[in-house]
Amino acid sequence: MTINQTKAVRAVPVTGRIGAVIEEVQLHENLDPTVLNEIREALHEHQVLFFKGQHHVDDASQEAFAKLLGQPYNHPTVPVKQDTHYIFELDSHKGAKANHWHTDVTFVPQVPRYSILRGVTIPETGGDTVWANTHTAYEDLPEGLKKLADQLWGIHTNEYDYAQFKPRDKEGNEATQHYRAVFESTIYKTRHPVVHIHPETKKKHLLLGGFAGRIDGYTTSESERLLSIFDSYVTRLENTVRWKWSEGDIVIWDNLATQHYAVADYTDQHRIVRRVTVGSHVPVNEAGEASSLLSKK
């Protein structure tokens, strides 16, 4: 394991395969272009970057900084947080718990590029987030499974949503049901390659996760078995990094290179994180075939 030491940015790896802490960088809209470029380079190398102690960042400055990385991308169905332009809020008291493995918003053809997530209200215990490297997952596949995956297409839909956690109390159930209704206010189905080529690194990545409901051309039971096999490579512990949040932490990740899971182990404690997503890309396989929208209703 090596530490990426450059003139402007020090990236300290957290694990051997994914994740690095960026030291002594304060995020803001007037960030030096050299620092910004090195953050991009570190994202390509480590997929997930952790910035501790960014207490100076509020909603407005998070939005302003995020725009340095790309054009803001608003969620297709969930409205932005009140009094903001681009913030997607995950509030556990409002039924928003992303406790399943997923790549963000793969139920539409244009998949978000980068996510910038800020810890606002963090439980005293629990509430970690885990990320997985979808390139090393692909590389770990036996050659036969690689060849199979290269040819497959997954059908993604937002009927597989964040609201799978079932709170015990009536109020929590109502909040979860409301969140589900908003999330599924428009149902999308999109056909994505199971293996796509990253637009910058040109590496192969598995594109699956919780929104991938089945494999095109296979029965439900066959799809479940195939998805289980491929996803098991993504979520192997040696392929992941787990982050214990503190209020004021900011995490930036490459959404086209990862899956993530927010661990819902904090019982009735309150957890709020706020995300701005920027950029988008239509995935393409090695044959040059691109993702496509199947339906919207």
Image: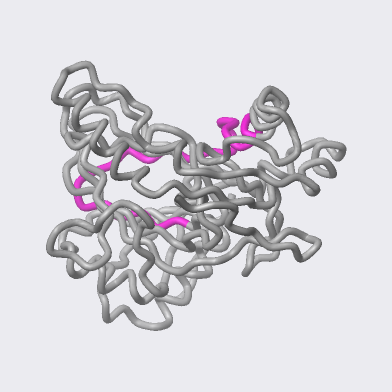
Asked whether, in this view, residue 154 is left or right of residue 55, the answer is right
When the figure is inspected, residue 140 is found, relative to residue 167, above or below; the finding is: below
- State yes or no: residue 235 in magenta: yes
Residue positioned most to the front? 297
Image location of residue 143, percent across then percent down: 86, 40
**Residue in the picture at 33% in, 26% down:** 165
**Residue in the picture at 34% in, 82% down:** 32
- State yes or no: residue 214 in magenta: no
When the figure is inspected, residue 257 is found, relative to residue 268, above or below; the finding is: below
Task: Let me know if residue 142 appears in the view.
Answer: yes
Q: Which residues are magenta?
A: 231-253
Q: Quadrant of residue 51?
A: bottom left
Image location of residue 197, percent across then percent down: 69, 60
Q: Quadrant of residue 44?
A: bottom right
Q: Quadrant of residue 92?
A: top left
When the figure is inspected, residue 201 is found, relative to residue 270, above or below; the finding is: below
